[in-house]
Image (cartoon, rainbow, N blue to C red):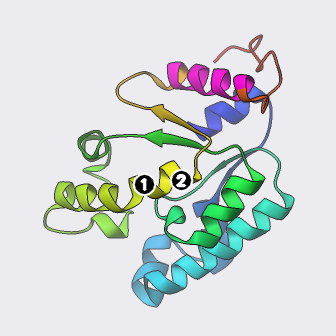
Amino acid sequence: MGRRLGQRLQIPFIDTDEVVERRVGCSIRDYFEREGEENFRNVEEAVIADLAATAHGVVATGGGAVLREANRIQLRAHFHVIYLRSSPEDLFRRLRHDVKRPLLQVADPLGRLHELYGARDPLYRETAHDVVETGRPTVAMLVNIIVMQLELAGAAPSDGGSDRRD
């Protein structure tokens, strides 16, 4: 989604998970297993602080980035945050075969998604300037919705790159 939005707006796309992996020199899953969640969150916080100070473009964060107050403050202050809200069931349908997400490598991943949603949803809402329900629209439809939200907020070019094809 973020890549497509960046293309549409003709601005760079940055995934904080990719920046973390470059910084630690291995996959998040490997780092998580070797160093633990707390150390991973420390690196993630440093990456978000660095991007808040320097980044221009679409920034996608990992799902747990909102767990730290420092991240919520940096994100809200330096970016126009859009919470792409998905139900635990929608997330499960999309992620059930994903083995790269350490927090979902449990016996009951759907139950775990419900727990994570319960803890994180209020934090996402606190951080976000806008909420977009993802449901089942196509990526192109969601990009159009996000561009409209950004335009309404004055956070995107007025044409939103609308002359470009998705």
Q: Is residue 135 magenta?
A: no
Does residue 99 appear in the picture of this structure? no
Q: Which residue is mark 1?
A: 122
Q: Contact (CB < 8 A) between labels 2 and 1?
A: yes
Which sits in the foreground, 48 or 13? 48
Principal secondary structure, stretch drawn in magenta: helix
Of all residues, the one furthest to the top in this rendering is 163
Q: Quadrant of residue 73?
A: bottom right
Residue type at numbered disc 2: Glu
In which quadrant will I find the C terminus? top right
Residue type at numbered disc 1: Pro
Of all residues, the one furthest to the left in this rendering is 107
Q: How many marks?
A: 2
- Above-or-below relation of 30 to 92: below
Range of residues picked out in magenta: 141-152
Does residue 29 appear in the picture of this structure? yes
Q: Residue at x 49, y 40 (%)?
A: 84
In the image: residue 91, left or right of residue 122: left
